[in-house]
Amino acid sequence: MLRQGDTGDWIGTFLGHKGAVWGATLNKTATKAATAAADFTAKVWDAVTGDELITLAHKHIVKSVDFTQDSNHLLTGGQDKLLRIYDLTKPEADPEQIGGHTSAIKKALWYNNDRQILSAADDKTVRLWDRVSMTEVKTLNFNLSVSSMEYIPDGETLLITYGRTIALYNSSSLELIKSFEAPAPINSASLHPEKDCIVAGGDDFKLYKYDYSTGEELESYKGHFGPVHCVRFSPDGELYASGSEDGTLRLWQTAVGKTYGLWKCVLPEELVSENSDAIYNVSSELKA
């Protein structure tokens, strides 16, 4: 589904997959969408009309899709352990393939201005690949399978979660900047665009907010009735969205009390004034 970012209002539904959808993304201009599904296909859609444009057949479940900045190429990854690069200007052509992972790929992203590719898999590795030579440049090894990966190009930061750990890496060197532990296994985390804080969600149905600098837990709260599988900040940092096994998507305000989207901020003096007007109107009606 496509929804309005600041209100959650439904815009439209992309109909066509015959299996669970594991991944979805928009291109930079939000004119195209791509989805990855359990029906062994990735699909490209017109995000304005909702029309299906291209179906890309795979040999197994597809988990991840990502557009290049010019929207001309689509990167996919999934259960068959292969990365595929499709030229969307020639959709009938065979894709380029990169092999190396020994287990299913969970997430694959274009990296470093589309000159490189970053992939995370169930083989407990995150691997960096060179786009031109199609060879592996660097490997990060973990003691558990990586559950999520977010790349923030402007902030030169890579955010990775595995087990209860939330880890931040320098995107240029892939050196660890800092990491901290959550009280429960974390499925997803997202960094505020201005590096104010990190939000995370996982198996205990809770959302956690951490101070970026210190790793201190600022707050935690339960709003979902099932494990949280995805958390993401809006580009302006005013909101973050959480998707859960309970079948709901929830929008949360980063700074509670601001007027934004559906949130209407009423200042205390406005509230007093409104109450005074209401009392005056009621008393006037009674006298009449």
Image: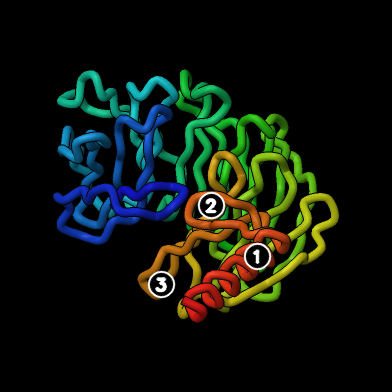
Q: Which residue is mark 2?
A: 232
**Mark 2: amino acid:** Arg
| Residue 245, disc | 3
- Residue contact at pointers 2 and 3, CB within 8 angstroms: no
**Mark 3: amino acid:** Glu
Separation of disc 3 and disc 1 at Cα?
38 Å
Q: Residue at x 40, y 55 (%)?
A: 8
Q: Which residue is mark 1?
A: 271
Q: Nearer the viewer, residue 251 or 136?
A: 251
Question: Could you tell me residue 99's position as x and y percent?
Answer: 41, 38
Q: Would you call the spot at circle 1 few (<14 residues within 10 Å), some (14-19), or many (20 or more)?
A: few
Tell me if 249 is positioned left or right of 96 in this view.
right
Residue 97 vs 181, above or below: the answer is above
Q: Secondary structure at mark 3?
A: loop
Image label count: 3
Of discs 3 and 1, which sits in the foreground? 1
Occupied quadrant, residue 95: top left
Question: Could you tell me residue 208's position as x and y percent?
Answer: 66, 67
Question: Could you tell me residue 261's position as x and y percent?
Answer: 49, 50
Q: Which of the two discs, 2 and 3, labels the residue nearer the N terminus?
A: 2
Q: Which of the two discs, 2 and 1, labels the residue nearer the N terminus?
A: 2
Occupied quadrant, residue 188: bottom right
Q: Secondary structure at mark 2?
A: strand
**Mark 1: amino acid:** Leu
- Residue contact at pointers 2 and 1, CB within 8 angstroms: no
Tell me if 52 is positioned left or right of 128 in this view.
left
Q: Which of the two discs, 3 and 1, labels the residue nearer the N terminus?
A: 3
Q: Secondary structure at mark 1?
A: helix
Residue 146 seen in the current view: no
Q: Nearer the viewer, residue 251 or 265?
A: 265
